[in-house]
Amino acid sequence: MTRVGITGQAGFIGSHLYHYLSLFQDRFELVPFRDEIFEDPGQMRDWVVRCDVIVHLAALNRHNDPNEIYRVNTGLVRDLIGAMESTGVTPHVLFSSSTQEDHDNLYGRSKKEGREMFSEWSARSGGLFTGLVIPNVFGPFGNPYYNSVVATFSHQLAHGETPRIEVDKPMKLIYVGELVELLSRFITVRKAGTEIRISHTSEHTVS
């Protein structure tokens, strides 16, 4: 039985992953996570010692101040690494980065640097690390104006609004159900790698 904790458990990908893994109770024991745990170092330490696997999905995707996105996302990684190092545990860590790494923005920078910090932790501690670079994710319960441009366009069309194309280029996408199935596979086979690029499963032009 593998004990799995998911930061960002209540979020878009996190909730899908949590419910998917809960279908396999003979293989996975889910260790519940609440966002408030990040605010209490003691609770964070108690949580990491209960996990064989940690899937780090918690992140700030949108904010009026891009510097806040960078500060929060890199801070969450530091907090998680600090909790693991202070307790001496080395769970298998899977980190959800984004193809935004390839673009010049602070969100992409925060994800790339987070992945690099986990890679350095893995080298120091001997812990298993899986750094995933994931394309745009879409599917049920995605929040418009936050999780996915697909959710945003769907919301706008459903409300009689005209979607506005800010960047006119093909979108490379993966369905959230396909993604969580992949994540469960990585957990099961304990696949490691500092930069594993997840292939998109569909591509669409919105113009």
Image (cartoon, rainbow, N blue to C red):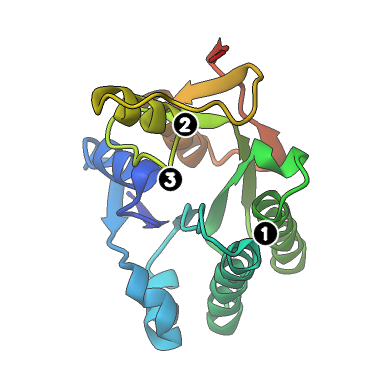
Q: Where does the C terminus fall, quadrant-wise?
A: top right
Residue at x-position 54% and y-position 31%: 136
Asked which secondary structure carries label 3, the reply is: loop
Relative side of 15 to 59, left or right: left
* Closer mark to the observer between disc 3 and disc 1: 3
Separation of residues labelled 2 and 3 (CA atoms): 8 Å
Q: Position of residue 67 (x, y in %)?
A: 66, 67
Location of residue 120 (image quadrant):
bottom right
Residue at x-position 42% and y-position 36%: 184
Residue 87, numbered label: none
Amino acid of disc 3 = Tyr
Location of residue 161 (image quadrant):
top left
Of the numbered discs 2 and 1, the one sitting upstream in the chain is 1
Q: Is residue 132 above or below residue 155?
A: below
Instruction: Identify residue for label 1.
Output: 114
Q: Position of residue 2 (x, y in %)?
A: 37, 50
Q: Is residue 181 above or below residue 90?
A: above
Q: Is residue 62 above or below residue 121?
A: above
Amino acid of disc 1 = Gly
Location of residue 88 (image quadrant):
bottom right
Separation of residues labelled 2 and 1 (CA atoms): 24 Å
Relative side of 126 to 153, left or right: right
Relative side of 88 to 7, left or right: right
Of the numbered discs 3 and 1, the one sitting upstream in the chain is 1
Residue at x-position 34% and y-position 75%: 36
Instruction: Identify residue for label 3.
Output: 146
Instruction: Identify residue for label 2.
Output: 149
Asked which secondary structure carries label 1, the reply is: helix
